[in-house]
Image: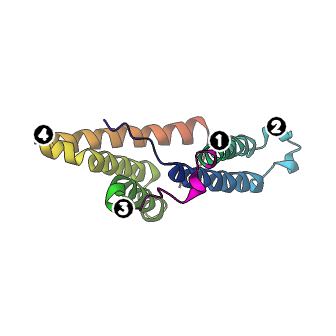
Amino acid sequence: MDDRKPSAFADLVSGSCWVALAAAIMIGSWRMDRLEHLQASIYSAPGIVPGLIGVALALMGLVLMLRAWWAGALAGAGRPRFAWSEHARLLTAVALCLAFAIGLVGRGPPFWLAAAIFIAVTVFAFQFPERRAARTLLRGALIAVVYGLVSGYAVHYVFQELFLVRLP
């Protein structure tokens, strides 16, 4: 196990990314319908929970940035050089999420099937090196498909039937 701590500069960059994400969440929640035409209370507005989560993320991102600043993140020494090869799993996750959002959702298959495909491919992709080394690729593929189908149906059921959210 690697016991190295991230550099102060890495914490500064991470904190700024969290603050940017939080700002996007807060802007999105502010733009959500407040249901004023239904005389709904401000506390029942759909954007209140995402807005509060955005505020919490922003505060935690700012705390991370302050800690990094106090640790000398802006001193210039020790700034790590970004190596794409060290971030292969992150890039794989981003590519899979973009493929799901852009290529699958609303493009043909029903949502439960799109979610099942995404989850199965993601599970298989991240288990692939270990499964290949253990020579259990077929078993890993079958397990990934089962996880995908169960999760895809569960997501569909919870959102569509319990929360009454229309899915694409």
Q: Which comes before the other along the chain, label 3 or label 4?
A: 3
Of the residues tagged 4 and 1, which is closer to the observer?
1
Q: Which comes before the other along the chain, label 2 or label 3?
A: 2
Q: Which amino acid does the dot numbered 1 rest on?
A: Met
Q: Is residue 167 visible?
A: no
Q: Residue at x 69, y 43 (%)?
A: 59
Which SS type dominates the magenta stretch? loop
Local SS, label 2: helix
Q: Residues within 10 Å of mark 1 (few under 14, many from 20)?
A: some
Of residues 96 and 32, the one drawn nearer to the viewer in this rendering: 96
The CA span between labels 3 and 1 is: 26 Å
Q: Which amino acid does the dot numbered 2 rest on?
A: Tyr
Tell whether position 15 is magenta.
Answer: no
Local SS, label 3: loop
Q: Which residue is mark 3?
A: 83
Residue 85 location (% of width, % of height): 31, 60
Residues tagged 2 and 3 counted as in contact (Cβ below 8 A): no
Give the magenta-colored segment's residue range.
69-83
Q: Which residue is mark 4?
A: 134
Q: Which residue is mark 2?
A: 43
Placement of the N terminus among the 4 image quadrants:
top left
